[in-house]
Image (cartoon, grey):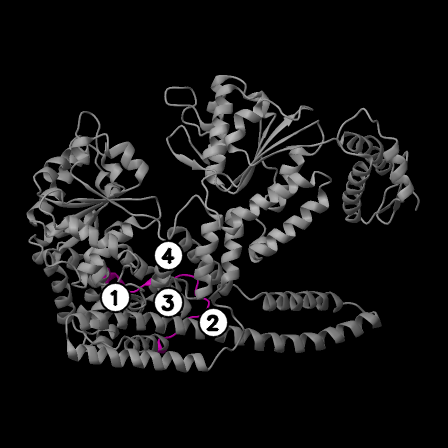
Amino acid sequence: MDSSKFSQEALRVFAEAKNIAIRCDHAEITDLHLSLAILRQKESEIKYRLLEAGVDLLSYERKLTEALQDRRATPGVSKLYYSRQYHRIVLVSGEISRASFDAYVRTPHLYLAILRDRESPSAAIAAEFGVTVESVQSMLAARLTASDELGISPEQMEQLNRFGRNFLKEAREGLMDPVLGRDEEINECFRVLSRRLKNNPVLIGEAGVGKTAVAEGIAQRIAKQDAPALLRGRMVFSLDMAALVAGTKYRGDFEERLKEILEIIKASKGRIILFVDELHTIIGAGSGSGSMDTSNILKPFLARGEILMIGATTVEEYRRYIEPDRALERRFQKILIEEPSEEAALSMLRGVVSKYETHHRVRIADGALIAAIQLSKRYITDRYLPDKAIDLIDEAGAMVRMSMDSMPQELDEWNRRIIQWEMEHILLLDEADPAAQRRRQTLEKQLADERARYEERFAAWQKEVERLDELSRLKELRDEVRRSLEDAQEAHRVDDVKRFVAERQAFDAKIAEIERIGPHYPVSREVTEEEIKRIVAVRAGIPLSSIGRSESEKLEQAGKSLLAEFVGHRDAVSAVRQSILRARSGLMKRRRPVGSFLLVGPSGTGKSYLAELFAKHYYEDERSPLSFNMREFTDKASVNKLIGAPPGYVGHDAAGALTEAVRLRPHRVIVFESVDHAGAEVLSLIARLAADGEIADNRGRTVDFRNALLFFTVTSTDRDPPVRELLRDGLDGVYYFEDFSLRERRELLTLRLRELQRELEEEQIELSWDEATLDAVTAGFDRAESGAHPVAGYMERTVLADLAAKKLLGRLRPGARVVIRTGGADVVS
């Protein structure tokens, strides 16, 4: 069987038929397996048509299942065979496909081939529900008449289907996600499409804001007859550029294909609206060896108004590819698609959540939707709503589904314990020792009890999984009935409306009945806020615990932790904390960074260490802050290291170290060390960054620094360094770090010893010291050394060196007690 001749849905039918045969322990695949597989497809055209015809799909599927259960099972079969009926169905479906001028064998062709064998069990069961060859043929005929409405032949319609998607057909069959919150943009598109001239809208917006969804919304509004009279009945055709280019081996192949597509759309006299996603890809597509590209082929059709076209691209790509081609650019009317607000994004998620519940067979709590919006907005800053929130929901649904498909941890551990006891029992069978015999008898009794309890719980779990699967299947069927009901209501088919309402009520009653009899085992099938937090923690690279706390709790805890680890300079600490509180409160909107502080003082007084602590506690970054030593940025060209080299220079394809890091992670602490050594160009860039809160990189992208906290350090005893004047417009404060007093150095030493104490506790080693030792060590520090250098020197050269030597000699073992002395560390036990 050549799989390339079958549609993706048909291939899924074959795979599902094989799975059904395996689950039923059948040795061969027959027409019954194929029929049931067709009915079990989630989004099947046949199911949609059968529902429209009033077929009771639930009873139909039950009949097929009973017929399969009546067939002889062959447990332990190692190889599946294909029956003669199966091969005949495959051959006949190919003939039907060719007769209907279809490029692929689709599910309706397979179903029609099954029914043509009137003696088969599947055909007999279908006949009980009024499904015959003639009725299915009429369904296929209705499918082909859609091309007549558009003024083109079935062959031309099939040509279009080869190189794109029929949005109108998908909308009518309910295969699209609902589009909510974009009514204003859709109406603006309708206004542009209704114009006499320049009636080709181009949707411009950042990736993920919903440009393609607007085009799908247009198709859905047309399908529901909720569009201007001028546009009703028109088809939205999405061109697939990859399919158009694929397989074009020789010069002119691509142009010939494209001309055929455009001529078909032209022949429809405006009844087909062309949609090109990623519009910038038409520039240069197909060009080579002197051939024309897509844009040059499109221009005459657009200029003469022979086709209607909707484009979609990002702002950057529109500026780079479309605007330079003025002849192409003026054919379009720009429509800006902005990122939705959190409230609008939430309504969008509520509109599509049922699709994800059906796909993953889970329930998604409304709290999970709210968390996805809020957490993605805060922690995933390089993407846009609603796309990034939908991704979180999708991944969380997949995570819950995977946990459902695997055995619960309780049962898995229980089973492993039983296996362990069984192995021990086998080893004890040959032992003659009385104690071993008593242990064997005890194990036999335990195994009998545990196996019985385990099998009971395991059966309950399997029963619960089957119950939940049945619930999901019934909900899928109810959704299909709901779509058919909506179509019948729009077409004012009163009898069909009554029938579909009755079917929906029957499904509701059946679902309620199944929900009442469970659960048999506690299986979680709900996506909650906790699952969203886990996904965000992995994506953003931050601790899960920090996401669960409220903003006020985090800020309060961060302040306590920082003050416990930092000695002195309380005025600087307080000022930086206040700037963060002001920014996080949201009361004051400003375009500048969270805070910009110049820290001046001798070496070792804690200027860079303060930045590290703020990064750790307030920005939840366990790694060190983004740091640049300005001694490496002294020449004029050094600015290219920060924002990237301009076009024409070596390395212009690489992004800037500063701009790219902040673009990917805007919430961070940035330290410019020894800023007084920076070159004039670099210093000017830094000053502009601190004052404006944004700079442009080498690709023209504006990088936002409003969520960044900036520190500038100067190692000097001059309280008023010259660089202060150059940075004054962007600074929130200048602080001079005095050298540590004797008392502060004693506090620093205590902090370092406590850190060492915590590390040794992990190795079960006790560390202690007394106050007299601290006083003696502190008094002996060299007064000529500044800052924390004497403390660091004592810890490294005396304490750590002594401990390392004792560990190498084997004296420092778990359980040892170490006492700090003036001259080092002694192991006392």
Q: Which residue is denoted by mark 2 in the rendering? A: 465
In this view, the mark in front (4 or 2): 4
Residue for badge 3 = 21
**Could you tell which of marks 1 and 2 lies nearer the N-terminus?**
1
97 over 245 or under it: above or below: below
The earlier-in-sequence mark between 4 and 2 is 4
Which one is earlier in the sequence, the residue at label 2 or at label 3?
3
Of label 4 and label 3, which has the lower sequence position?
3
> In the visual, does 37 lie left or right of 133?
right
Q: Which residue is mark 1?
A: 85
In the rendered structure, which segment of residues is drawn in magenta? 70-91
- Which mark is on residue 345? 4
- The image position of residue 529, as x and y in percent, is 50, 61
Q: Nearer the viewer, mark 1 or mark 3?
A: 3
Query: Callout 1 environment at 10 Å: few (<14), some (14 to 19), or many (20+)?
Result: some
**SS label for mark 4:** helix
Callout 4 touching callout 2 (CB < 8 Å): no
Q: Residue 581: percent from the left, percent from the top? A: 56, 48
Q: CA distance from mark 4 to mark 3?
A: 44 Å
Q: Are dots 1 and 3 in contact, CB under 8 Å? A: no
Quarter of image, res 282 = top left
Is residue 214 positioned above or below 417 on the image? above
138 and 759: which one is in front?
759
Element type where label 1 sits in the image: helix
- Identify which residue is drawn at 29% across, 78% down: 504
Disc 3 secondary structure class: helix
